[in-house]
Image (spheres, rainbow, N blue to C red):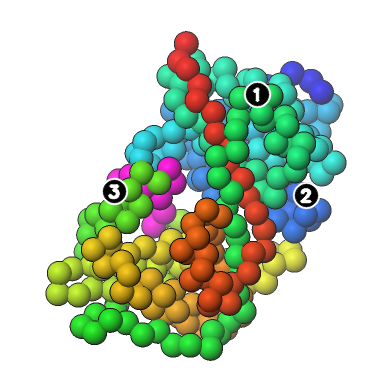
């Protein structure tokens, strides 16, 4: 495989990357690159870079490197897509990515692999990346059999842009602490998500009591794509620490899924860390089952 070249992420590059990702989706039923990569490809950060491995003119693998837009703490996010049949991450791409990170201040690097193999584990371990956590994608048929039961005195309403941003950020960051993906959000992080074409404030459910925002359920609709039906995703759900243990999380989950089911969506979906036994128990009680396992590999890279 030829030495990697830095992608300028111009229109032609993005089209080739998208075509490669679509070929993976066609072969496996799921993409290889996550939303964070596509956001950064659309609006690259100052230190963002892409490394491509080619067989002649054919793109066979692409590794994207960008700084996270969260601060809990800020880290590097890597996304990898390989042509069907390429079993392990190409060494040259990993070497190039680690060198780039070291030359731009170092810090933690997180590489996500969807549905990883033992070959991925071995190759990444050779490059100093260790499995940091597994993430389950879980699904459930809709509509659910139950209705939401909120604690007495709760007001439930949709998110209102221009009114609720700072309130939501405070509760989100309290609920998720130092979570590497969902914690440490700032106004810019939220505004970038709200600028996504899928954002729909009517599916961003907030629950208030006399003390303010107690919890939320932010949902996302995925339109049909290849083998996939239309799906209603619980994008992020959280409860203020002072309100945990009251059944609010279950009520918010049921309420949000009812709202997407009302739109004719028959599949609900969410992601949950495999080690989060409490959340897993709740979701399984609602009928969710594991559809796919993704894995985050982490490495600390020293600055040069």
Q: Is 83 located above or below residue 158 in the figure?
A: above
Residue 144 vertical placement versus 248 (above, below): below
- CA gap, disc 3 to disc 1? 35 Å
Q: CA distance from mark 2 to mark 3?
A: 35 Å
Residue topped by disc 3: 187
At 49% from the left and 77% from the top, the residue drawn is 257
Q: Would you say 47 lies left or right of 289 here?
A: left
Is 191 within the magenta? yes
Q: Does 116 appear above or below 45?
A: below
Q: Quadrant of residue 209?
A: bottom left
Circle 2 residue: 23
Q: Which residue is mark 1?
A: 127
- Choose top left, top right, bottom left or bottom right for residue 64: top right
Which segment is the magenta one? Answer: 180-194
**Side of 145 where 115 appears, left or right:** right
Instruction: Say whether disc 2 or disc 3 marks the residue closer to the N-terminus.
Output: 2
Q: Secondary structure at mark 3?
A: helix
């Amino acid at each position: 495989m030829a030495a990697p070249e830095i992608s300028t992420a111009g229109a032609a590059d993005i089209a080739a990357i998208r075509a490669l990702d679509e070929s993976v989706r066609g072969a496996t039923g799921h993409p290889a690159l996550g939303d964070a990569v596509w956001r950064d490809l659309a609006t690259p950060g100052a230190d963002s870079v892409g490394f491509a491995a080619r067989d002649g003119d054919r793109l066979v693998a692409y590794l994207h490197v960008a700084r996270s837009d969260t601060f809990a703490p800020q880290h590097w996010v890597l996304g990898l897509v390989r042509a069907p049949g390429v079993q392990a991450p190409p060494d040259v791409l990993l070497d190039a990515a680690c060198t780039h990170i070291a030359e731009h201040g170092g810090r933690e690097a997180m590489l996500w692999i969807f549905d990883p193999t033992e070959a991925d584990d071995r190759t990444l371990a050779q490059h100093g990346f260790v499995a940091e956590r597994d993430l389950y994608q879980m699904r459930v048929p809709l509509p659910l059999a139950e209705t939401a039961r909120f604690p007495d005195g709760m007001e439930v309403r949709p998110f209102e842009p221009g009114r609720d941003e700072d309130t939501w950020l405070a509760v989100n960051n309290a609920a998720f602490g130092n979570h590497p993906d969902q914690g440490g959000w700032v106004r810019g992080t939220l505004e970038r998500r709200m600028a996504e074409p899928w954002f729909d404030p009517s599916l961003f459910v907030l629950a208030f009591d006399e003390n303010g925002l107690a919890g939320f359920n932010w949902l996302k609709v995925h339109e049909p794509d290849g083998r996939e039906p239309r799906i209603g995703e619980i994008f992020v759900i959280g409860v203020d620490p002072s309100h945990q243990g009251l059944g609010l999380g279950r009520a918010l989950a049921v309420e949000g899924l009812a709202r997407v089911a009302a739109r004719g969506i028959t599949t609900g979906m969410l992601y949950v860390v495999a080690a989060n036994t409490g959340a897993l128990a709740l979701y399984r009680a609602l009928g969710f089952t594991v559809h796919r396992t993704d894995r985050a590999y982490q490495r600390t890279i020293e600055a040069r």
